Image (cartoon, grey):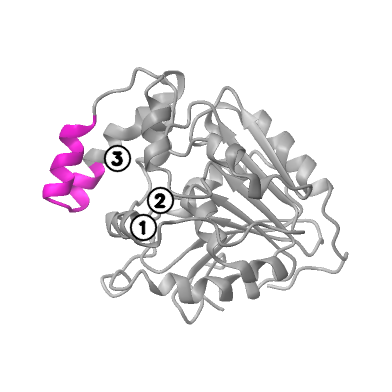
Amino acid sequence: MESTNSAKYFFDSNHVRYELYQTSGKESYNWLFFPGGPGLDSSYFRSLVDILDLPGNVWLIDMPGNGGNFSDKSSENYDHWFEIFPSIIQKFENPILVGHSFGGMFPLLFPELEKMLKGFVILNATPSLWFEESAAYSKQFKLPDLSKEMQEFTERPCQETFEVALAACMPYYFPESTLEKGRELLLNVPFQYLAAVWWQRKAIELNFSAKWVPQNTPTLIIGSKYDCICPFSMFEKDKRFQRDNIKLLFVEDAGHVVWVENPQAMNAAFAEFSSNLHFPDSPAEV
């Protein structure tokens, strides 16, 4: 990988952007944080990493055309992500993947990760198509009608109408008590509508369902009560994920971005998960 003018940023030959956000200790761990959306810039993960105590290197990763790693050329073919994703993992020694929402779904399409990853953390994602269960789950909460904003975006898809629709969706992401804090987190970082539209269409085209269920890879799956986007019940019902190497954790007082409401639960969950991982003591090579 080649660095940019900033010592913390790197790009590979596929224009994937890597931010080395944190380095702690000499352990050869590489935590790879893969963002949601898609389209949402990985910088929103900084607020999570800041409350954790992770040994080794913490990388925030943006595919070409994602978030601030955007150019007109990089947005031409999001299907290219399928081709380049495994090569990202292969670049690192002892990789531990942390995927949020889309970032937790997309890796489930790559069975070859079983032999690559030393650990996998899935945050607020689903193992299969989520639209119907999301709509049914959200009915128990008194949430606003989104039909106007969604219709405008459907009829005139662009960055402007996407951002209006996204802002309207925030009550589906966060409980009322943290709604403003959540808005501040997600609406103040780059979020590319083209990537989001691509995944909505691609998920339906693929009839999205996990092609890979971790067989031996230590895996932690976290969901929460007020997440009306990715209901945790979908993992709970999926018998494929009822395995000794997979732990399911449900957080009562949290929404789609658990660490906004319950940083203590996230800190404890990551601490337990990392304490059960065993790697060589050699320094990490980056």
Amino acid beneath label 2: Gly
Asked if labels 3 and 1 touch by Cβ distance under 8 angstroms, the answer is: no
| Image coords of residue 62 (percent x, y) | 47, 62
Secondary structure category for the residue under label 2 = loop
Residue at x-position 56% and y-position 64%: 8
Q: Quadrant of the C terminus?
A: bottom right
Secondary structure category for the residue under label 3 = helix
- The answer to which image quadrant residue 96 occupies is bottom right
Q: Is residue 82 left or right of residue 159?
A: right
Report the residue marked by disc 1. 199
Compare marks 1 and 3 and give the one earlier in the sequence. Answer: 3
Q: Is residue 209 left or right of residue 273?
A: left
Compare marks 1 and 2 and give the one earlier in the sequence. Answer: 2
Residue 44 vs 217, above or below: the answer is above
Real-space CA distance between mark 1 and mark 3, rounded to the nearest whole angstrom: 15 Å
Q: Specify start and end residues of the magenta stretch as a single range.
A: 146-163
Residue at x-position 20% and y-position 40%: 150
| Image coords of residue 24 (percent x, y) | 75, 54
Residue 175 belongs to magenta span: no
Q: Tell me if residue 184 can be seen.
A: no
Report the residue marked by disc 2. 37
Q: Main secondary structure of the magenta part?
A: helix
Q: Quadrant of the N terminus?
A: bottom right
Residue at x-position 38% and y-position 47%: 189
| Image coords of residue 97 (percent x, y) | 63, 58
Residue 152 vs 28, above or below: the answer is above
Nearer to us of marks 1 and 3 is 1
How many residues crowd mark 2 within 10 Å: few (<14), some (14–19), many (20+)? many
| Image coords of residue 263 (percent x, y) | 62, 31
Report the residue marked by disc 3. 166
Asked if labels 2 and 1 touch by Cβ distance under 8 angstroms, the answer is: yes
